[in-house]
């Protein structure tokens, strides 16, 4: 399963178009924000799994079985699921949510409220993607930890095979206890031209 499809493929284009339309922003800003939101969420999930939260993630993925991907246009058409999205952000990002929003805001030029809306839109889709993988491969919590580790920064061979992204800079940003202003440019810069056309 190639997670770059969430940004660069048909699914990514649907998300970006919907975000631009619902928020009244241009597609370039929406693309920058979505392109940052997906890796931040994956990094945070990986961090949670490494720190003993894998069972909780596995349980949550039981409720996100990938069916969202079967009617993505319907989900996006109604502006996503605010309650579900906010719940996921609270669990996954915790007290780092503002740091992440500040980083994406600085990079995309969107305000924090708009960034929150994009994260709320993207979070259930990321969980649906992971849930589908869990179901397809019959993964337990250890399998999910391995999957996330591979996606976020395993060896270049395994990440290439899994459509992974090396996200060390995102991990560092999530570790920061500052105001979210330090090292953001470096973290975003690590993406290089990967997400940008």
Image: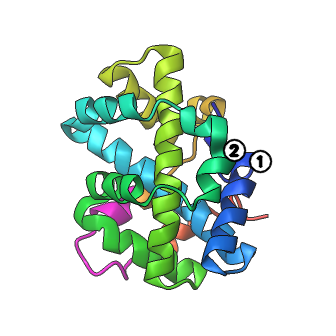
Q: Is residue 148 above or below residue 77?
A: above
Q: Which residue is mark 1?
A: 10
Residue at disc 2, secondary structure = helix
In this rendering, position of residue 145 left or right of residue 111: left
In this rendering, position of residue 24 left or right of residue 186: right
Q: Is residue 178 above or below residue 52?
A: below
Residue 179 pos. (x, y %): 28, 81
Which of the pair 163/115 is nearer the observer? 115
Q: Is residue 191 above or below residue 8?
A: below
Residue 193 pos. (x, y %): 71, 63
Separation of disc 1 and disc 2 at Cα? 7 Å
Q: Is residue 17 above or below residue 141?
A: below
Q: For the view shown, which residue lies furthest in the top direction?
A: 138
* Residue 171 appears in the picture as rendered: yes
Q: Earlier in the sequence, mark 1 or mark 2?
A: 2
Which of the pair 36/86 is nearer the observer? 86
Residue at disc 1, secondary structure = helix
Q: Which residue is mark 2?
A: 5
Q: Are marks 1 and 2 in contact (CB under 8 Å)?
A: yes
Task: Kindly identify the residue that appears in the image at 69 percent across and 72 percent down.
Answer: 21
Q: Which residues are magenta?
A: 171-182
Residue 66 pos. (x, y %): 53, 32
Task: Kindly identify the residue that appears in the image at 53 percent across and 46 percent down.
Answer: 125
Using the rendered view, name the quadrant where residue 59 is placed. top left
In this rendering, position of residue 165 left or right of residue 130: right
Quadrant location, the C terminus: bottom right
Task: Kindly identify the residue that appears in the image at 44 percent across and 81 percent down.
Answer: 112
């Amino acid at each position: 399963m190639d997670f770059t499809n969430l940004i660069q493929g048909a699914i990514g284009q649907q998300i970006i178009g919907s975000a631009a339309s619902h928020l009244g922003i241009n597609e370039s800003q929406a693309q920058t924000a979505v392109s940052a939101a997906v890796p931040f969420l994956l990094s945070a999930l990986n961090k949670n799994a490494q720190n003993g939260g894998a069972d909780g993630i596995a349980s949550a993925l039981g409720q996100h079985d990938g069916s969202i991907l079967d009617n993505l246009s319907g989900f996006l058409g109604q502006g996503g699921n605010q309650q579900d999205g906010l719940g996921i952000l609270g669990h996954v990002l915790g007290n780092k949510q503002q740091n992440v929003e500040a980083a994406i805001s600085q990079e995309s030029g969107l305000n924090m409220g708009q960034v929150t809306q994009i994260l709320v839109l993207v979070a259930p889709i990321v969980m649906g993607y992971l849930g589908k993988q869990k179901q397809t491969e019959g993964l337990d919590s250890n399998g999910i930890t391995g999957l996330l580790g591979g996606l976020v920064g395993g060896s270049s061979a395994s990440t290439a095979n899994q459509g992974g992204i090396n996200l060390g800079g995102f991990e560092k940003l999530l570790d920061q206890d500052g105001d979210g202003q330090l090292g953001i440019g470096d973290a975003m810069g690590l993406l290089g031209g990967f997400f940008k056309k």
